[in-house]
Amino acid sequence: MVYAILDELLPSHIQFLEQRDPFRFMISVILSAQTTDRIVNIVTGPLFERFPTVEALASSSLKEVEEIIFPTGFYRMKAKNIKACAQALVDKEIPSTMEELVKLPGVGRKTASCVLGDIYGKPAIIVDTHFGRVIQRLGLVDSKDPKKIEKQVALLLEETKHYRFSMTANMFGRTVCHAKKPLCEECQLRELCPSAAAFLQASSKG
Ligand code: SF4
């Protein structure tokens, strides 16, 4: 039911990161940890202008990379990871399984799921802060642990719907079910949501 409502409500194509080339997309996802996609989209333009290929990033100056990606936060660690990731991928394809992807520097399950879903069109539940919040508020899972959320949501839906649901629930979290003030009054999932009453009561008290 939740899947169908969100599927109907949200655009058929959802894309948060601007870089579409598979390698650049993966680097963008690594950079998106602890920051917003808006900031990632701002820095990836200059980053790939300066280092356009896997090889160029692999042999880049760490200091120069750090300077470019500074606005994303955790820039030292991220610069080290994206350079090491590029080095690991010189003359190789981007892996297409979770097991192989998480072996790459800086690539955790969330980044790997993004790559699997976006680049390879494989089933992927992508648990980021927005997705996790929406799913928990809707009472679809009983855990805050991203790995458990991923597993529990995966069992609720057939595989062909995994990636689409990741994107719609994520976008819904960004636009309606905000972290601080969710728009419960106008929410199309209100009737199904066990958290709605408490939020509505809190907002009516001002
Ligand atoms: S009713 Fe409120 S808490 Fe529940 S999904 Fe909608 S916006 Fe989020």
Image (tube, helix red, strand yellow):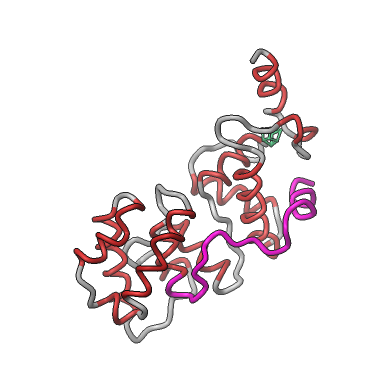
The one of 64 and 12 positioned closer to us in this rendering: 64
Ligand 1 quadrant assignment: top right
Give the quarter of the figure containing the C terminus: top right
Residues rendered magenta in the picture: 1-24
At 52% from the left and 66% from the top, the residue drawn is 18
The number of callouts visible is 0
The residue most toward the top is: 205
> Residue 199's quadrant in the figure?
top right
Residue 182 screen position, x and y as percent = 64, 32
Residue 203 screen position, x and y as percent = 66, 20
At 71% from the left and 29% from the top, the residue drawn is 194
Whether residue 13 is in magenta: the answer is yes
Check the image and report above or below for 130 versus 91. Answer: above
Give the left or right position of residue 165, taking residue 74 as reference.
right
At 40% from the left and 52% from the top, the residue drawn is 33
> Residue 126's quadrant in the figure?
bottom right
Residue 65 screen position, x and y as percent = 26, 65
Give the left or right position of residue 36, taking residue 194 as reference.
left
Whether residue 23 is in magenta: the answer is yes
Residue 181 screen position, x and y as percent = 60, 30
Check the image and report above or below for 57 versus 82. Answer: below
At 29% from the left and 75% from the top, the residue drawn is 57
